């Protein structure tokens, strides 16, 4: 898979809601969230990318995504000003 990367990302709505996800196509996923195609993010509007990391494998990305979805990961993001 040359040139194909996985992204773990954090988006935030204008209401202050946060969402962590993983994808191969970052731009398309953010557009999907802003157009209401994702059930959870329909609660918010104007989702903006606040942080992302790039990975070579889906396995590495999944581990990082799970980290950001737990308390230690949220605290890591908060200490750096992303949340």
Image: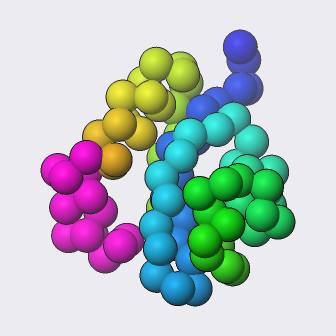
Total numbered labels: 0
Q: Report x, y in % for residue 32.
A: 79, 56
Q: Which residues are magenta?
A: 70-83
Q: Residue drawn at (64%, 31%), measured in percent from left and top?
A: 5
Q: Position of residue 28 (x, y in %)?
A: 80, 51
Name the residue at the bottom extreme. Answer: 14
In the image, taking residue 5 as reference, residue 17 lies left or right, namely: left
Q: Residue at x 64, y 38 (%)?
A: 23
- Nearest the eye: 53 or 71: 71
Identify the image quadrant of residue 3: top right
* Secondary structure that dominates the magenta span: helix
Q: Nearer the viewer, residue 79 or 47?
A: 47
Viewed as shown, does residue 55 lie left or right of 23? left
Q: Is residue 77 visible?
A: yes
Scheme of colours in the image: rainbow
Decide whether residue 58 is among the magenta residues: no
- Above or below, 67 relative to 44: above
Residue 76 in view (yes/no): no
- Locate residue 43: give its quadrant: bottom right
Check if residue 72 falls in the magenta segment. yes
Q: Which residue is outermost to the top?
A: 1
Residue drawn 46% across and 19% down?
59
Image quarter (top left, top right, bottom left or bottom right) of the C terminus: bottom left
Above or below, 51 relative to 20: below
């Amino acid at each position: 898979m040359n040139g194909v990367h996985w992204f773990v990302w954090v988006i935030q709505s204008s209401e202050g809601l946060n969402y962590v996800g993983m994808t191969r196509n970052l731009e398309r996923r953010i557009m999907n969230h802003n157009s209401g195609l994702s059930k959870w993010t329909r609660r918010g509007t104007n989702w903006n990318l606040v942080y992302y990391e790039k990975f070579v494998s889906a396995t590495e990305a999944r581990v990082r995504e799970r980290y950001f979805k737990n308390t230690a990961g949220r605290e890591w993001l908060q200490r750096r000003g992303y949340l």
